[in-house]
Image: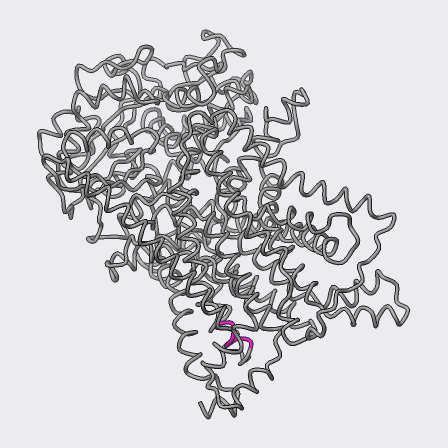
Amino acid sequence: MTRARGGRRPPLSLLLPALTVVGLLLLPLAYLVLRASGDGGRGFRILWRRSTVELLWSTGLLVAGVTAASVAIGVTLAWLTTRTDLPGRRIWGVAAALPLVIPSYVAAFCLLGALGPRGLLQQLLGVERLPEIYGYWGALAALTLSTYPYVLLLTSAALRGLDPSLEEAARGLGRPQREVLRRVTLPAVRPAIGAGALLVALYTLSDFGVVSLMRYDALTRAIYLQYRSLFDRTPAAALALVLVAVTALVLVLEGRSRRRTHRSSPGTARQPRPHRLGRWTIPALAFCTAVVGAFLVLPATVLVYWLARGLERSDWPWSETMNSVTASALAALAAALAALPVAILARRHPSRWTRVLERLSFTGNALPGIVIALSLVFFAANYASPVYQTLALLVFAYVVRFLPQALAGVESSLAAVNPRVEEASRALGRGPAWTTITVTVPLIRSGILAGAALVFLSAMKELPATLLLRPIGFETLATDIWRFTSVGAYSEAALPALLLIAVSAPFVYLLSGRREPDATEHG
Amino acid sequence: MRKLVGALLAAAALTVLAAGCGGDDGDGTAATGTASAEGGGSLVVYSGREEEIVAPLFERFEEETGIDVDVRYADSAELAATIAEEGDNSPADVFFAQDPGSLGAVSDSLADLPDEILGRVDADFRGGDKWVGTSGRTRVIVYNTDALSEDEVPDSVFDLTDPKWSGKIGIAPTNASFQAFVTAMRLDVGDDRTREWLEGVKANDPKFYEKNTPVVEATASGEVELGLVNHYYLYLVRAEQGEDTPIENHYLEGDDPGALVTVAGAGVLVGAENQENAERFLEFLLSDESQRFYTKEAAEAEIPLVDGIEPREGIPSLEELAGAGPDVDFEQFGEELERTLELLNETGYTS
């Protein structure tokens, strides 16, 4: 304790939990190394195939495309809904964030149902042929739909927490609005944009549902092909390690972009004067309408259309709803608790090692669910059989997959809290652990809640790990959707899909409507 | 601060409580299940077959025997991988799979079946002594009845290389059933002829789908005019879209590889805790009554594998199919699959 007060060396009460968390999160990686190196390293031969290089390229194209589209849409919407006089901006802000609750595989089904060959739109227009939706553009659209809200939510929160006096000063110096935006506002929220873009990129890397429905060849499809067609876990593990390598590259890139930014601490909780859109009001409204129309109204319409076709056959999935909420709430709680020591260590004791430790916890986020599931099947069935196929293991799988989302929330809030507040507490004789609980946590509670809400939403949607790790007979809304879509019964899948959206929606409202109480706390 | 901690604790308590209630629910039903039981006991099944299709079978088995059945539904191949990872610690007693491939992949983990079970099914539809086929399906050409009349539909898959089918064929090249069909073709007519066929069909610009169901849906919508699928998907799509959906199956004759018959099947795990119940379940699946279920009640109308049970009207029986299809051995399929996938990769069907 005394050592911690003086130097930068992290106290054991912080280091131990952080190391435990990251160690547990690395289980899938350990599993992959074990599998890929087994059988005389035969699995690695697949890496020298030409098709693997092509897959890397096509995966890279998709990640770049989805990330760019999500940043463009998310940042524009964030600025419009927090900083301008856009009519109905609060409502737009919530509506535009809502696609976050639509599972990407449902989004793909809906896009195909609406825009695919002989889909709703074609019937409506009565035309013979629409442009092909399968392939790159279809995958890009479906993945952007489910991921741009990450950028929107994190950027909005950062914009709201930003001290308006910076921009006012720049404006006072006679800078035109566009330059203020480009040189002051955007750089200040760049860490938030980067954090959002990172979540988007990792989601895209891990996704299998969309690329398989849209028939786009990405690395995850090749991994599934090994499991599903060849029943061969060795090359599958080698390919998954490639995915880990790509993740590492993405993390390094994001880390670089973060280093080039300056940080300003939030000063006042004053509301900034909204920017007048003037003649840009109509185009801005058109943009919001287009995004909300394409990414929320369109899929919802398809679901309602399907629902109307099969309503009389459906039972209300109450217990499934309850199970989804229970497992996701526990995952949110566990992820928030697990993220705390890692985030505090990385932010309050910055060094190369704490940084590496924090980045290592991202491993699980970019791996497809099947890999996480099988790794936990292996470890739990063989070394921890009492927890195997229990709710606890399922919750743990969610934490492994989604911890970075909790981290994003906690870290963005931590960055905004002046460390001197914590130092003062320690100077007054409170130990580091007690300081964390009584001072830091209350100050960053909105960030913790935001991170927990993101994990909750992701866990609600999660399917591949849920299928294999859930307690036997434990049905969730996601497994219900799968159960019906796997036999093509879309009209029956629509009800659990709409319920999933309905149950998740209030959390998006909380996330998007969230003020920055951190700032008022010490403002 | 105290309020926040209170709120967090309350939330935690609530969720734990909710989890507890969920668990109680499960135990509650389990208790009633045992109470009404005559024989009792339990059984754990990993089912790669869809809940929508096989759940009634499990319910009947429970009613009949009083045995409590717990079913884990997931993709067959993923369950096979799960069983492999679990090793000796698998909680599963029975693996009920969609295809011979998944069963073959875990055959080391499967116990030898007693002769009474094996004897119910022709040796062609078993995986040695390790698993038995429980229902059959045949490859067909599904076609859109608005676009084609039955005599316009080719009688051999080899006719599909004709340029007149350009842009009109639907295929699910990453699906196990299509891959099994290509393997059968290779074993039947050789790699060169198969490559020629694959290239010829590829030149006709076929449309690729993820699974069989989307192929049939695309045929129904007219996106393609015909598709290469298993026979029963027609019935699933009709159940969703209505009986008047403009699709029909065209069954191929002779020894055309397009008439391949394959099976779904089941096996008992070596370490099964409830081995007796597991064998009882397999006997149940092969009972006349359950076999009739496939023909009369199940939405997907599969082909019964046990002697003397007729399939649903319009679906050929095993005897009628006996002459059809290439003469191939399922046990070869596992080892041949890699070469099939290479061929599909080289000819541009998969990556």
Q: Residue furthest front?
A: B3
| Residue sitting at x 49%, y 33% | A494
| Residue sitting at x 64%, y 69% | A258
Asked which quadrant contains residue A84, the reply is bottom right
Main secondary structure type of the part rendered in magenta: helix
Find out whether residue A191 is within the magenta segment.
Answer: no
Residue closer to the observer: A516 or B89: A516
Residue closer to the observer: B314 or A409: A409
In the displayed structure image, the side of residue A84 where residue B128 appears, left or right: left
In the displayed structure image, the side of residue A301 where residue B19 appears, left or right: left
Residue A44: x and y in percent read 40, 56
| Residue sitting at x 23%, y 13% | B310
Residue A177: x and y in percent read 85, 61
Residue A149: x and y in percent read 61, 52
Q: Which residues are magenta?
A: A342-347
Residue B135: x and y in percent read 25, 25
Q: Please, is residue A299 above or below residue B216 in the view? A: below
Q: Please, is residue A289 above or below residue B152 in the view? A: below
Picture mark count: 0
